[in-house]
Structure formats: structure tokens, C-alpha cells
């Protein structure tokens, strides 16, 4: 690879100066959230999370701390500013008043698409709201060997959303992964009702439930450790929400409603659905999270079990005193017995969770916690957030998830995705001044029992430092350093003796964001990744240049080129990539090569948009086999097209 070309590209563009670009669109704001809150995660439900809040904006004239906390960029200082402003001015007259309430301009810009100043419908009239459709197709080359899979290499997704009078909503989705035969291999649908009266919500069809800190039940996406060292730790449950994502598990299907009077809420929910589990002769060990059913063997395992869920949430909230208390009872009945691979002797067909959740706010202190007992095994999560001043925010959190704790729909904060076999202490601080914003966290955790990959319990610690500079005349820059140390047991020559060693991963990032006039926004980025163990040491890097150009009022162009070189997978580099709306793309790069993409968004007429993207990764040292032939210098190509329509009245 020619490193010189990459360095020239990075350095030349870094010298260009310009003016500030102000026309932030919804997809760009969502991308900002993604870059800030996602660290080595890949979850398409993230886009749907923000899109759902955009479609059901938070009323800044009535929302309390719990509702406003659903926007991860808002800290308690900013929330206090919003609440105090509406008290002094008797409410916000427009969302642009956020510029006047004392929060930072960047924060105001990012939350505007997700808030409103009240009910968005005319009193006494039932007007048509909106109709949205989204269809996209993705094709990858070289094509897969069609003899290996039942279907072609296209990924197809179609979705329709109907909003009537901002009260009645209908969602329907059909999705096909590459290699699957049916163009509706997965589908979901729901109809929901939302209002400000006694009955807040009613959902029939597919939906999700979020409670507490995710120890018993949560939606598919949950924020975790990230460059936002404070806000990403505590979860802010939305209760029940209509499900409109393409993920094929971790949602419910049936009916749910939310009833509210005074300070009390009641949410009963019921679900029965066929789903796909990892099944053997004894029972099932987990849900099939891949959602891929491309071969006859995979298809035979599709929807191989039934789960019936019954649940009830009760809650009390005193907004004046900033107190929130909620209780959950939830029962899952399985058509096949469940067992853990670590404890195969424990088989059960039913899972009962009883959980309590609370939030208490004082002037400078916020305490949050959840205690959940599932089949008699207790897990808990507590955190305390301190607002030292308007410049300094600190959080400390403790989590304990026993090795034999298992809740099917859990998604708690931690290192492990399945919310079990973990004990950890997290500390984070955010300092915001006129000199920029600094985030730092340190997390220490350990497993309590052996795992499927480690024969004994292991310890892990990691810390992250992230500095975001203030805006200068035409841009800003960002520095990030992340270090992780994990214990690991090596198998020695006799295969019986285990030796304890450390695996160390370090990642450094420098990103420069700047503008050229009103039409071009550029990002130059350097990433370095290093891995060390007793057996090897390797270091990799990537250099990238990204551009966003508003060529015309109705045309936006994105493009990026990346030069990367890493000795192996252990020094891999993760880079987020702009993609079609609703598609989350966290690229993983290792080996040696060049990656590039170009994406064009064009508004044909008002309410009709088309997006087209071409991307490729060239790896000169890779090869694949096709029949009896060997193909060298492999280039992975990807073509994607999306059409969106929106009719509003």
C-alpha cells in the first residue's frame, strides 16, 4: 500500500478553511448521535430508536426528567435549564426557544427534531397525519455461490407507516436477508393508539417493553459504554413502543396498553409468538440472534419454539419532587425447556421475573437502581450521578449479575450482552468548559464463573479518554484513546495446564471536522489499533477522508476513502459509515486494503427521495474459491438503492 498517498490526502485537506454549515437534516443529526454513542456496536435498531422519538416527539412544555432523559445528549444540567426556562416564560412558544434557555447551541440543534411544544393536532378535527414508505435493496459482489443458499444475494426491505390525526399509527415491514428465498422471510406489523388522556397507549401486534435498567426486559437496542462517559450509563425506559425494526428477535407480539391517572401508571401486556431458538435434544439455550435462514438446515430451525409472555408494570411518579418508582411482574412460558450451557442440569419451562426500579433526584444528586429476581436469582444495578457544577458531571455505577441469572429479554448495562455472570464498577466524568468537552471513564469488571471460552473467572478493566474541542472559525477536532486489559488463560503444551496472561488492546483516534464554504463538510481521521499478548504483538492503522456536499438544495452527496493496514483481526479497526436511512453500518477493517464509498440523496419532488450508494473494499492479499477456481485480489462491492415517500396533510 502506498502510505504516502494517504498522508498527502489527509494533510492537504486539513489545511482548507471555510464557513459553518448550518442546514442539519434529520439523518445527519442521527449520524451525530451514532458517532457519539456507539463504540464498536452494530445494531440496526439504533436508527429506529431515534426515528421513533422523532415521530413521537417529547413535549418540552410538560415532560419531566424521565421523559427528557430519553434523549442521550441531555444531561441533568441541560434538563434543569429547560424546565426552569418554561417556568419563567410560562412555556416554550417554539422549539427554537431552546437557543434562549441556556443550553449549548450544539445540544439545541441535536434535540430539535425530537421535541415539540405540545399536541400536534387541531382541536375538534381529525386530520390525516402522514403516510411514509421506505423500500431498499442491497446487492453484494462477488456473488455468493447460489448452490449454497436457497435464495439470491439481494437484501430487500419494505416498510410502510401510516399516521392518522397523530393518534392512530399503523406499521408494517417485510424483510429478506441475502441468501434467503422468500421476499417476506421476516415480517412484522402493528396498530397503535396514542393520546394524552386516561388511556395513553394501546398497541396490537409487534411491540417492545422497556423497564428499569434492562435486567428483566428491554428493547433490542440499549446504549452502553461510549464516548459519552455519563449519559450512556443510566437507561431511561419508554415503557411500551410499537416495533418496526428488521431484527427478528427480542420483541413481543400480542397486545399492550398504558393507562395513567394523576401520578400513577399501569401497563399490562400479553404476547404469544413463534420464534427461533438455539435448540438441541435437551431444550434451547438462547434465541437465534442472526435471523438468517438461507439453507435447508437453517430453515428447518426457523420458528422452532413458542414463547408466551404475560406481564404488568405499575408506577408512581412525583415530578415536583423528582421521584419515580415502578414495579414489574413478568412471566415467560416456553414450549421447550431452557437451560444454560454452564448449568445444563437446570432445566425449566417457565421464567418469572419480579423487579423494582426507582429514580430519586435531589438538587445535585440523582440516584437510580433496579433489583430483579428471576426464578429466585437476584441481580441488581445501582448508580449515582453528581452534578458538581454546570461544568462537571460525575457518575458511579455498580452492577451484579450472578452466573446463573438469566432473563430472556434482558439487556442491562455491562460488558456481556446477556446480562449474567458479571460484577463491575463503573466511574465516569464529563467536564464541559469554553475550552472543550472532556469525557473519561474507568470500568472494572470480572466474570463470577467460568465461561464457554474461559475455564476460570477472569478480570477485565478498560478506560477511555475523549476530548472534543470547541468550534473554531470553520470546524473542530476530536481526540480519543481507549485501553482495555483482559485476563486470558493459555493452554500449554500438555493441554492440561492453564497459564494466566493478559490481553491488551489500545485504540487511538484523531478526527478533524471542518467546512469549506456553505456546501462542503469534511472529516479527516486517523485511527491506530494495537494488540499485545504473551504470544504476539501487532499494530494497525487507518487513514480516512470523508466529504459531505450540499450540491443543490435537493441533492446531497457523501463520499469517503479509507487506507487501512493491520497485521490481523486482533488489531482490527471499527469505523461508522453513512448508509441508507434505517441501515446501520459499522465497518470492520483488518488486513491491508482500500475502502471507499459514494452515496447520493436526491429529493425528486417534495416528499419523494431516492438514495443510491456504491461501496467497495479492495484487499490485495485476500483470495476466495469459486468452484475449482481461485480468485485473488478480492474486491467486495456493494450496491444499494432506497426510495422513500412521505405524504403529509
Image (cartoon, rainbow, N blue to C red):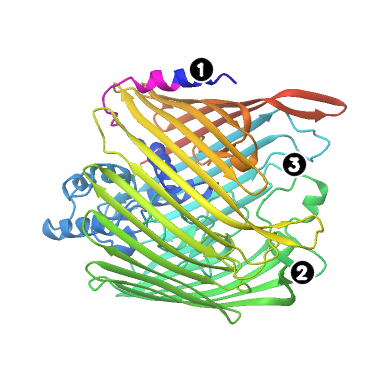
* Image quadrant where residue 321 sits: bottom left
Q: Main secondary structure of the magenta part?
A: loop
Mark 3, secondary structure of its residue: loop
Measure the C-alpha gap from mark 3 to mark 1.
44 Å
Residue 19 in magenta? yes
* Mark 2 closeness class: few <14, some 14–19, many ≥20 residues within 10 Å: many
Q: Is residue 118 above or below residue 14?
A: below
Which is closer to the viewer, label 2 or label 1?
A: 1
**What's the magenta region?**
10-23
Residue 32, image x and y in percent?
39, 41
Task: Report if residue 603 is visible in the image.
Answer: no
Q: Position of residue 272 (x, y in %)?
A: 63, 67
Dividing the picture into quadrants, the one containing residue 623 is top right
Question: In terms of sequence position, does the residue under pointer 2 or pointer 1 come before the other?
Answer: 1
Residue at point 52% right, 31% down?
Answer: 542
| Residue 283: image tag | 2
Q: For the residue labelled by badge 2, is the local secondary structure a helix, a strand or a loop? A: loop
First of labels 2, 3 by sequence position: 3
In the displayed structure image, the side of residue 34 where residue 420 appears, left or right: right
What's the mark number on residue 181? Answer: 3
Task: Quadrant for residue 150, please give it.
Answer: top right
Q: Position of residue 52 (x, y in %)?
A: 43, 51
Is 19 left, or right, of 11 in this rendering?
Answer: left
What residue is shown with label 1? 5
Amino acid at each position: 500500500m502506498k502510505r504516502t498517498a494517504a498522508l498527502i490526502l489527509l494533510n492537504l485537506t486539513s489545511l482548507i478553511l471555510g464557513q459553518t454549515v448550518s442546514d442539519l437534516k434529520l439523518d445527519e443529526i442521527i449520524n451525530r448521535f451514532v458517532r457519539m454513542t456507539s463504540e464498536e456496536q452494530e445494531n440496526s435498531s439504533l436508527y429506529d430508536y431515534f426515528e421513533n422519538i422523532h415521530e413521537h416527539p417529547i413535549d418540552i412544555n410538560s415532560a419531566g426528567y424521565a421523559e427528557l432523559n430519553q434523549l442521550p445528549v441531555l444531561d441533568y444540567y441541560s434538563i434543569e435549564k429547560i424546565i426552569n426556562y418554561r417556568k419563567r416564560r410560562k412555556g416554550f412558544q417554539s422549539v427554537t426557544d431552546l437557543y434562549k434557555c441556556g443550553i449549548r447551541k450544539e445540544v439545541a440543534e441535536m434535540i430539535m427534531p425530537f421535541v415539540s411544544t405540545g399536541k400536534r393536532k387541531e382541536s375538534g378535527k381529525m386530520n390525516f397525519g402522514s403516510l411514509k414508505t421506505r423500500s431498499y435493496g442491497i446487492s453484494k459482489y462477488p456473488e455468493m455461490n447460489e448452490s449454497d443458499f436457497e435464495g439470491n444475494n439481494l437484501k430487500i426491505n419494505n416498510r410502510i407507516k401510516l399516521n392518522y390525526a397523530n393518534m392512530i399509527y399503523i406499521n408494517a415491514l417485510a424483510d429478506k436477508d441475502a441468501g434467503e428465498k422468500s421476499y417476506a422471510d421476516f415480517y412484522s406489523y402493528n396498530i397503535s393508539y396514542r393520546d394524552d388522556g386516561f388511556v395513553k397507549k394501546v398497541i396490537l401486534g409487534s411491540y417492545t417493553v422497556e423497564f428499569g435498567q434492562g435486567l428483566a426486559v428491554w428493547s433490542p437496542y440499549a446504549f452502553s459504554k461510549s464516548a459519552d462517559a455519563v449519559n450512556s450509563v443510566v437507561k431511561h425506559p419508554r415503557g411500551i413502543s410499537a416495533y418496526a425494526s428488521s431484527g427478528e428477535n427480542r420483541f413481543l407480539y400480542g397486545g399492550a396498553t398504558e393507562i395513567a391517572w394523576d401520578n400513577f401508571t399501569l401497563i399490562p401486556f400479553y404476547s404469544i409468538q413463534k420464534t427461533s431458538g438455539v435448540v438441541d435434544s435437551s431444550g434451547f439455550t438462547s434465541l437465534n440472534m442472526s435471523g438468517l435462514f438461507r439453507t435447508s438446515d437453517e430453515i428447518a430451525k426457523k420458528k422452532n419454539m413458542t414463547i408466551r409472555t404475560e406481564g404488568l408494570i405499575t408506577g408512581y411518579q412525583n415530578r415536583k419532587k423528582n421521584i419515580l418508582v415502578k414495579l414489574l411482574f413478568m412471566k415467560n412460558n416456553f414450549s421447550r425447556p431452557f437451560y444454560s450451557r454452564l448449568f445444563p442440569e437446570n432445566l425449566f419451562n417457565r421464567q418469572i421475573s419480579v423487579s423494582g426500579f426507582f429514580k430519586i433526584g435531589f438538587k445535585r444528586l440523582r440516584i437510580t437502581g433496579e433489583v430483579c429476581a428471576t426464578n429466585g436469582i437476584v441481580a441488581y444495578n445501582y448508580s449515582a450521578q453528581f452534578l458538581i457544577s454546570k461544568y462537571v458531571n460525575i457518575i458511579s455505577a455498580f452492577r451484579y449479575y450472578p452466573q446463573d441469572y438469566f432473563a430472556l429479554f434482558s439487556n442491562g448495562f455491562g460488558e456481556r450482552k446477556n446480562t449474567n455472570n458479571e460484577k463491575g464498577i463503573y466511574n465516569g466524568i464529563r467536564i464541559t468548559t469554553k475550552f472543550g468537552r472532556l469525557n473519561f471513564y474507568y470500568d472494572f469488571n470480572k466474570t463470577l464463573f467460568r465461561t464457554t471460552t474461559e475455564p476460570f473467572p477472569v478480570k477485565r478493566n478498560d478506560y477511555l479518554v475523549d476530548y472534543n474541542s470547541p468550534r473554531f472559525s470553520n470546524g473542530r477536532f476530536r481526540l480519543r484513546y481507549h485501553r482495555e486489559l483482559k485476563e486470558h488463560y493459555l493452554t500449554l503444551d500438555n493441554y492440561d495446564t492453564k497459564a494466566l496472561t493478559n490481553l491488551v488492546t489500545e485504540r487511538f483516534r484523531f478526527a478533524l471536522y471542518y467546512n469549506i464554504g456553505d456546501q462542503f463538510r469534511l472529516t479527516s481521521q486517523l485511527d491506530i489499533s494495537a494488540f499485545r499478548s504473551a504470544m504476539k504483538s501487532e499494530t494497525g492503522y487507518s487513514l480516512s477522508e470523508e466529504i459531505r456536499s450540499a450540491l443543490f438544495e435537493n441533492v446531497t452527496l457523501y463520499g469517503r476513502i479509507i487506507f487501512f493496514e493491520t497485521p490481523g483481526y486482533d488489531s482490527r479497526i471499527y469505523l461508522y459509515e453513512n448508509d441508507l436511512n434505517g441501515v446501520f453500518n459499522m465497518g470492520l477493517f483488518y488486513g491491508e486494503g482500500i475502502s471507499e464509498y459514494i452515496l447520493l440523496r436526491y429529493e425528486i419532488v417534495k416528499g419523494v427521495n431516492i438514495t443510491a450508494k456504491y461501496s467497495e473494499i479492495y484487499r490485495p492479499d485476500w483470495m476466495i474459491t469459486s468452484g475449482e477456481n481461485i480468485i485473488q485480489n478480492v474486491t467486495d462491492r456493494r450496491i444499494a438503492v432506497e426510495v422513500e415517500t412521505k405524504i403529509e396533510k
